Amino acid sequence: MYQKMVGAHNIAMADGHVVDSDSYFDAIEGQLGFRKAQQQDDGEEVSLSAASAPTQKRTSVPAAPTTRTAAGTPSKSQVVRLSSEMREMASMMGMSPEDYAKNMVALRKEGKLQ
């Protein structure tokens, strides 16, 4: 699913959409199949995404302190911070933020993601 998301991003960019614009997200959600049809009052169908559903404003979680290990010493745990866009994409893909972060770390180790 992650590869589909990256592909949808690339297609949206190739089509000239500006990142984080409504048309950009419309293009991505259309590519990924996250659009739902809803009826307007006049009976006309309108396409809405799960991301356009109303949400409550949340305060951000305070940042955890960073920990450092000596060079060459493997860390027992790794802290990965996800942006709100990353958390939203994980939700749209039906993944937990933890699974999304694990996949992101694995892709970075494979050199497929910077």
Image (cartoon, grey):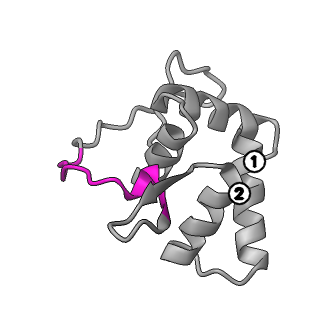
110 and 58: which one is in front?
58
Q: Please say if the residues under marks 1 and 2 sit with CB atoms less than 8 Å apart.
A: yes
Query: 46 above or below 78?
Result: below
Q: Identify the residue at the far front of this view.
A: 43
Q: Can residue 65 be seen in this view?
A: yes
**Cα–Cα span, label 1 and label 2:** 8 Å
Q: Can residue 114 be seen in this view?
A: no
104 and 74: which one is in front?
104
Query: 11 above or below 37?
Result: below
Q: Are there few (<14), some (14-19), or many (20+) residues within 10 Å of tag 1?
A: few
Q: Where is residue 47 in the image (x, y as percent from the top left)?
A: 51, 62
Q: Quadrant of the N terminus?
A: top right
Query: 71 above or below 29?
Result: above
SS of the residue under disc 2: helix
* Start-end of magenta stretch: 46-60
Look at mark 2 in the image and give the residue it sits on: 31
Q: Residue at x 76, y 80 (%)?
A: 15
The type of residue carrying mark 1 is Lys
Q: Where is residue 54 in the image (x, y as percent from the top left)?
A: 27, 54
What number is the disc on residue 4? Answer: 1
Q: Are there few (<14), some (14-19), or many (20+) residues within 10 Å of tag 2?
A: some
39 and 35: which one is in front?
39
- Left or right: 16 as drawn, with respect to 25: right
Q: Position of residue 81 (x, y in %)?
A: 44, 42
Residue 48 in the magenta stretch? The answer is yes
Q: Earlier in the sequence, mark 1 or mark 2?
A: 1
Q: Where is residue 9 in the image (x, y as percent from the top left)?
A: 69, 63
- Left or right: 101 as drawn, with respect to 1: left
Q: Residue at x 29, y 36 (%)?
A: 64
